[in-house]
């Protein structure tokens, strides 16, 4: 009997344990369904409520003189909740929104595909199409009762007051899958900044979404706000931006650079504010709006002269003779030369058989005239003296590291940190680069002599060279260049208010400034002379181009003693610096400092604006695609300039 009682007791424990287990399973399942898994809650809420997203107005963008550049215009999205969609005439809807039946079916399939639309749920709002016009929205609104489960949602679309600065402003487009995964702010169908200011200041511009909770009846019809909007959340508008850009100056630069490839950058030395950032070719920002976005973007992307390349921060060029200013500063700081040190020139650098070549000028000559006349030999001698000074540096590689560090301190070799996406760093080699290249560490200045005149392996972006001009104007320091001057109710990042010193003494800069002033009054860039009104300091450059004619370069600042502006101009395939870079620089400086062009320079303005300098690849592309050349001449101008003809690969001046 005792044994039987014991068995019964065990069975009771077993049965009790099973019962407890079943209860626990039910509790866990209920917890999962009601707390963890949201579908049932969404279903219940969806029967009673309709949550309408309220999109904020994106922040507006103005130029430095408070002229409106980018604003918002109402637009409409067609959205739907899949579980609410009943039977309807799809062809009727297609007529209103200008879809084919095939497009309609594909869109539905894409929305249901969780690979393309992560987090898809039949209970949550899905975006069917965006950017409906007011007319399309009105027509659809009248028929919306025929399309159960579909709703109209209001948002805003960017609009532009000027056809300029497309690459700088950037564009807004539907967020990508990677953006959806990285930022929980977005849902499929949302729009965000993709390039330019719109991208780099996206979190400031986009604002915060709101929500409106609407009550449904038993048939799913909207009855009004839930508890009179007590639980609604109002959207918070994005912050407004004021740019440092002067849109009139920007537009004028684009006018001068039309039908050319290159860029213009102008900086206010005392603040680092970018006054204009011209890239050519460019595009009207309104091209990348609305339903023509994809077609227009593809057209721009396929153009061989790359209008989507932001050349001021992404183009990497040999800085040419503008780089001689950095060499003079380094040689002075390192006590390799004094202002009075003289080197000879016989039409080229004598120790290497007259290479690199040089143009005729007086010889021998000291530093300031060497800057003014842009003597190649002078700076080749200087580099040789520095890299060969084993008593001071120990070896050529060690001397070269000192040289490289000075160049980096001047703002080369690394990004400057401009507030735009995709800035390139250019290239400044170090000693290890040459040791690997020559497979020995006994190389000398003669092996790399071309870097003394801004050629060889050295490359820089137009922004970096414009920043060099600003640094010389400041006599030894710069502020990181930036295109946003003010963010509504938000201080600028401290990177743009921090003064960067090059570590080179101010008196050495005075020698370079004097050399640049003499280059304008009687040297290689006399075409930039604006005396008696403005004392300009300048430096030309003719950068070698292995793919065709040389690039025409001008770097400068003005006025000499109280600088207000620094400038860099590059025209690809433009020939000598004095041919295109200098006259464009002259006109841009006048436009900014005087507000108008001298009547005596109107002929120059017309000639430069009508000049066509396009690479051969552009003409090959237009012919192979049976296109017009897509070259636009300014109104009422004619050109007989020889530069109208495309340059052939390998042609030289």
Image: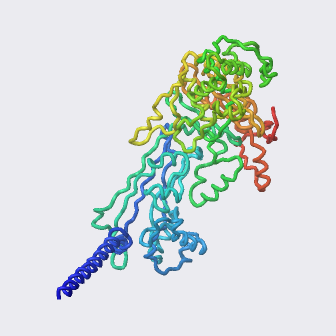
The correct choice, above or below, for 85 with respect to 71 in the image is below
In this rendering, position of residue 621 left or right of residue 10: right
x%, y% of residue 610? Answer: 73, 39
Number of marks in picture = 0
In this rendering, position of residue 595 left or right of residue 378: left
* Quarter of the figure with the N terminus: bottom left
Residue displayed at 79% across by 42% down: 646
Residue displayed at 39% across by 72% down: 39
The quarter of the picture where residue 430 lies is top right
Residue displayed at 66% across by 27% down: 322
The correct choice, above or below, for 151 with respect to 360 in the image is below
x%, y% of residue 173? Answer: 54, 56
Given residues 424 and 585, the one toward you in this image is 424
x%, y% of residue 483? Answer: 52, 38
Residue displayed at 68% across by 18% down: 385
The quarter of the picture where residue 46 lies is bottom left
* Residue 592 visible from this viewpoint: no
x%, y% of residue 344? Answer: 75, 14
> For the view shown, which residue lies furthest in the top direction?
340
* Residue 449 visible from this viewpoint: yes
């Amino acid at each position: 009997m005792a044994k039987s009682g014991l068995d019964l007791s065990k069975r009771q424990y077993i049965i009790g344990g099973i019962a407890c287990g079943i209860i626990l399973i039910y509790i866990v399942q209920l917890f999962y369904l009601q707390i963890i898994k949201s579908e049932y809650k969404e279903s219940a809420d969806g029967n009673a409520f309709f949550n309408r997203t309220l999109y904020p107005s994106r922040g507006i963008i103005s130029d430095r003189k408070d002229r409106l550049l980018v604003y918002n215009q109402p637009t409409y999205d067609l959205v739907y909740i899949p579980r609410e969609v009943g039977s309807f005439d799809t062809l009727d809807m297609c007529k209103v929104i200008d879809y084919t039946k095939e497009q309609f079916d594909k869109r539905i399939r894409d929305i249901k595909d969780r690979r393309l639309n992560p987090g898809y749920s039949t209970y949550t709002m899905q975006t069917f199409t965006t950017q409906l016009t007011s007319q399309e929205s009105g027509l659809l609104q009248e028929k919306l009762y025929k399309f159960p489960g579909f709703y109209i949602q209001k948002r805003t679309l960017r609009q532009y007051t000027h056809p300029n600065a497309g690459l700088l402003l950037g564009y807004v487009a539907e967020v990508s899958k990677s953006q959806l995964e990285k930022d929980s702010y977005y849902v499929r169908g949302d729009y965000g900044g993709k390039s330019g200011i719109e991208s780099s200041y996206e979190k400031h511009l986009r604002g915060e979404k709101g929500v409106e909770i609407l009550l449904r009846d038993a048939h799913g019809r909207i009855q009004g706000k839930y508890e009179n909007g007590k639980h609604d959340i109002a959207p918070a508008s994005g912050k407004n931006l004021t740019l440092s850009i002067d849109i009139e100056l920007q537009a004028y630069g684009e006018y001068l650079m039309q039908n050319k490839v290159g860029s213009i950058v102008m900086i206010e030395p005392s603040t680092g504010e970018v006054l204009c950032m011209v890239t050519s070719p460019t595009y009207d920002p309104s091209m990348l709006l609305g339903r023509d976005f994809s077609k227009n973007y593809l057209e721009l992307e396929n153009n061989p002269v790359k209008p989507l390349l932001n050349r001021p921060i992404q183009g990497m060029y040999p800085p040419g003779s503008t780089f001689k200013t950095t060499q003079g500063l380094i040689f002075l700081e390192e006590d390799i030369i004094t202002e009075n040190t003289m080197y000879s020139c016989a039409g080229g650098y004598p120790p290497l058989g007259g290479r690199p070549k040089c143009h005729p000028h007086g010889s021998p000559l000291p530093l300031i005239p060497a800057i003014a006349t842009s003597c190649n030999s002078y700076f080749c001698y200087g580099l040789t003296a520095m890299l060969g000074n084993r008593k001071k540096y120990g070896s050529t590689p060690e001397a070269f590291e000192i040289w490289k560090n000075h160049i980096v301190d001047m703002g080369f070799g690394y990004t400057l940190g401009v507030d735009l996406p995709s800035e390139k760093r250019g290239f400044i080699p170090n000693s290890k680069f040459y040791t690997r290249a020559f497979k020995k560490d006994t190389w000398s200045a003669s092996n790399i002599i071309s870097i003394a005149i801004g050629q060889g392996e050295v490359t820089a972006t137009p922004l970096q060279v414009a920043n060099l001009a600003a640094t010389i104007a400041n006599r030894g320091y710069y502020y990181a260049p930036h295109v946003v001057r003010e963010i509504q109710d938000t201080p600028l990042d401290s990177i743009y208010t921090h003064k960067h010193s090059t570590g080179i003494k101010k008196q050495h800069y005075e020698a370079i400034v004097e050399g640049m002033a003499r280059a304008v009054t009687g040297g290689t860039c006399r075409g930039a002379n604006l005396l008696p009104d403005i004392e300009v300091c300048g430096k030309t450059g003719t950068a070698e181009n292995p793919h065709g004619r040389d690039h025409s370069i001008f770097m400068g600042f003005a006025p000499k003693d109280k600088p207000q502006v620094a400038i860099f101009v590059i025209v690809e395939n433009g020939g000598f610096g004095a041919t295109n870079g200098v006259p464009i620089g002259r006109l841009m400086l006048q436009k900014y400092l005087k507000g108008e062009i001298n009547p005596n320079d109107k002929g120059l303005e017309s000639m430069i604006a009508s000049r066509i300098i396009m690479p051969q690849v552009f003409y090959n592309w237009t012919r192979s695609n049976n296109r017009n050349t897509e070259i636009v001449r300014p109104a009422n101008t004619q050109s007989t300039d020889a530069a109208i003809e495309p340059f052939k690969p390998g042609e030289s001046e």
